[in-house]
Amino acid sequence: MAKVLVVEDNPANMKLTSLLLHTAGHDVLSALDAETALRLAHEQSPDLILMDIQLPGMDGLAATAILKHDPATASIPVIALSAQAMKADEERSQTAGCDAYIVKPLRYKELYAVMERLLAKPREANNQAAHPRRPPA
Ligand code: MN
């Protein structure tokens, strides 16, 4: 079980994402905009952040860049959520420091798999290249 901060301005998407996370046994913190997300990241130290890219005001990539440049929040893994599969979005999310990238609509198997991979990594290693875990022999 993890404490997950969901940053999403669309109420229907927020509801669905929260449901998927609750179903998997996680605690959910929600933010409708980037400014609230930055505050909650500091106050609540979530284990992981799901960050919508398209937000009113500051966008999700700008918010991620701020989090990744702040030692207090840099180690929190961030999964970028994009409304559409755009190569530019994926590259920009990597540049901003996002640890993973998922295209909406969310598919629960993909979400859980990416979350499991990121939560299994030691915090300090989150910004390094991914080392896929081998299944036990
Ligand atoms: Mn949005």
Image (tube, rainbow, N blue to C red):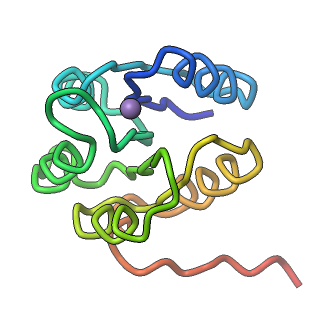
Quadrant in the picture for the N terminus? top right
Residue located 22% across and 20% down the image = 36
In the picture as drawn, the residue positioned furthest to the bottom comes out as 137
Q: Position of 36 compared to 54: left or right?
A: left
Q: Is residue 46 left or right of residue 71?
A: right
Quarter-wise, where is residue 49 in the image?
A: top left
Q: What percent of the width, then of the height, locates residue 117?
A: 60, 61
In this rendering, is residue 36 above or below 103? above
Q: Position of residue 55 (x, y in %)?
A: 28, 32
The location of residue 125, given as percent across then percent down, is 38, 70
Give the image quadrant in which the ligand numbered 1 is located: top left
User: What residue lies at 12% left-to-right and 52% top-to-bottom?
Assistant: 71
Q: Considering only vertical position in the picture, is 132 above or below 1?
A: below
* Residue 112 percent coordinates (x, y): 69, 47
Is residue 129 toward the left or the right of residue 62 in the image? right
What count of labels does the image hold? 0
Task: Determine which quarter of the picture holds residue 17.
Answer: top right
Q: Residue at x 24, y 69 (%)?
A: 95
Instruction: Using the rendered view, name the quadrant where residue 41 is placed.
Output: top left
Nearer to us in this view, 120 or 36: 36
**Quadrant into which the C terminus falls:** bottom right
Q: Relative to residue 100, is residue 137 depicted above or below?
A: below
In the image, residue 128 above or below residue 61 = below
Q: Nearer the viewer, residue 2 or 22?
A: 22
